[in-house]
Amino acid sequence: MTGVSQTVGPILTHVVPHARRSRWLFVFGSATLVAFLLQVVTGIALSSAYVTSSGQAYDSLHFITANTLGRIVRGLHYFGASAMIVLIGAHTIRVYLMGSYKYPRQMNWLTGTGLLLFTLLMAFTGQLLRWDQTGFWTAVVAAEQAGKAPIIGNWLARFVLAGSVPGGATLSRFFAAHVFFIPALMFVFIGVHLYLVLYNGISEPPAAGRPVDPRTYRAWYHRLLEREGLPFWPYAAWRDVVVGFGVVIVIATLAIALGPPELGRPPDPTLVAASPRPDWYFLWYFALLALMPKWSERWVILLGPLIFGLFLIFLPFVSPRGERHPLRRPWAIAIVICALAVIAHYSRMGHLAPWSPRMDAPPLPAEVVGTTSGPIAEGAQVFYDKGCEFCHLVSGYGGIRGPDLSNVGDRLTRDQMLTRILSGAENMPSYAGNMTAAEQEVLLAFLESRHQFQEGTPARPAAMR
Ligand code: HEC
């Protein structure tokens, strides 16, 4: 009466190639779809309790997380996002290595490229919605980076932030993008992508020495299906079902066992942290940008993604025919290995993160400060409160983004230190106007007391002064 079985029936039982060996490699697409649908469900649940205002977003997430169910839903959404990135990555690599983008499936590849881009944008916009220090500063840093791009930089940065400074409008813009624009585009693209998978047929596993020839391919594929095709349901689909369930179970286990990422401190624009650590899937890119020579940065920011994007878009049109088997396309294997190696290497660097402030550094202990009262002790407190310690090491405590200040009293004069503090530097914020005269006074007293050989150490040679 509804025509559902007439429509769905043929789709479920359409004939697909009989893959003998690489069967399990064909499940990543449907697994990505499962993760996406989970994101839709958990996302709707989250949005029903989330408040899109810069004053309340953080508190509303705290409220959600305090509730057991809310905590699990946030965890599902977080690990669902990670799963989607991993699965769409695996799907892209599979399609690329097997040459499945070749004739007649170029449009499948192109819509898939769009979906890959949208997935990355979802991950990025979602991180800001957390609206804690990390989420907030990630967006700020991203906007700063975008702003360095030649020509369109300024416009791009203003577009990302919805203004010249991050604030409530930024949050609204990211929220609208995250829950309306990008998902709407994704539904359309997924629809077209699936339609094309049915229309062109799923690609058969590649065989070395059997190149694609656009003139004969469709007829050949048709004969292949007639000869040895199998109905999609249940012969191929059962693997998609098993993996789909597996994905949900893994995500749910992680969500319950580990829970969502801790919310950091609420964003505080006066607390200057120059580069926070983004979620794991973007860590490598941030590390790459941070570790690159300064002069190349503005070019890599724009050219990197541009070259990657153009490569994906033009690939199926540049090589629509020829061998599909990876062993006959060594370049494809080399490109995938290089890309994975770069991502792995910079993810590791990002984890070691000398470039990133250490936000969890504890206050300096008394034996390091050398006293528990007076200006030096107060100065040590200012050093901690103003976030200097996030970037500077003192006797083994603190971050290593800036120079080690353990014996700065030996190296710099009071005036040199004051100039640096007030004017900042390339990777150090300026504290002029962000510190009272009294704070300055005790901070300098503290810094001046930092010597390689502390007061009272008998072995201190006179020449060291
Ligand atoms: C976001 C990280 C960051 C924060 C926060 C930070 N600094 Fe720095 N600082 C740096 C970097 C990076 C340099 C090196 C700048 C350069 O030489 O270009 C530096 C340099 C310095 C120097 C000069 C050291 C030398 O050996 O030349 C002093 C002194 C200093 N900072 C003190 C402070 C004090 C005091 C605070 C807190 C009020 C502070 N910094 C906060 C990153 C930071």
Image (cartoon, grey):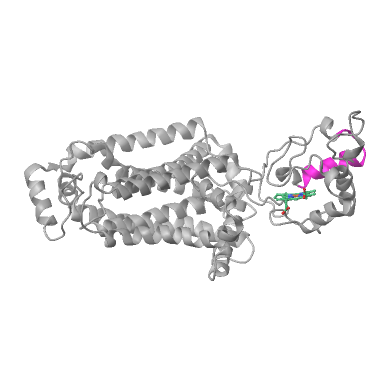
Residue 300, visible in the rendered structure: yes
Left or right for 6, reference 57: left
State the count of labels: 0
* Quadrant of the rendered image containing residue 453: top right
Q: 248 or 398: nearer the eye?
A: 398
Image coordinates of residue 139 in percent, x first then y, are 58, 55
Q: 362 or 151: nearer the eye?
A: 151
Residue 379 among magenta residues? yes
Q: Is residue 392 above or below residue 170?
A: above
Image coordinates of residue 150 in percent, x first then y, are 54, 68
**Chief SS of the magenta region:** helix
Q: 72 or 373: nearer the eye?
A: 373
Image coordinates of residue 215 in percent, x first then y, are 12, 61
Q: State the residue lying farthest toward the front.
A: 463
Residue 48, visible in the rendered structure: no
Q: Residue at x 46, y 40 (%)?
A: 79
Please state, as top left, top right, bottom left or bottom right, where the C terminus lies in the image. top right
Q: 389 or 407: nearer the eye?
A: 407
Image coordinates of residue 405 in percent, x first then y, are 78, 43
* Quadrant of the rendered image containing residue 269: bottom right
Q: State the residue lying farthest toward the top.
A: 458
User: What range is drawn magenta here?
Assistant: 370-386
Q: Residue at x 53, y 70 (%)?
A: 152
Left or right for 208, reference 251: left
Q: State the residue lying farthest toward the bottom.
A: 151
Left or right for 305, reference 128: left
Residue 303 among magenta residues? no
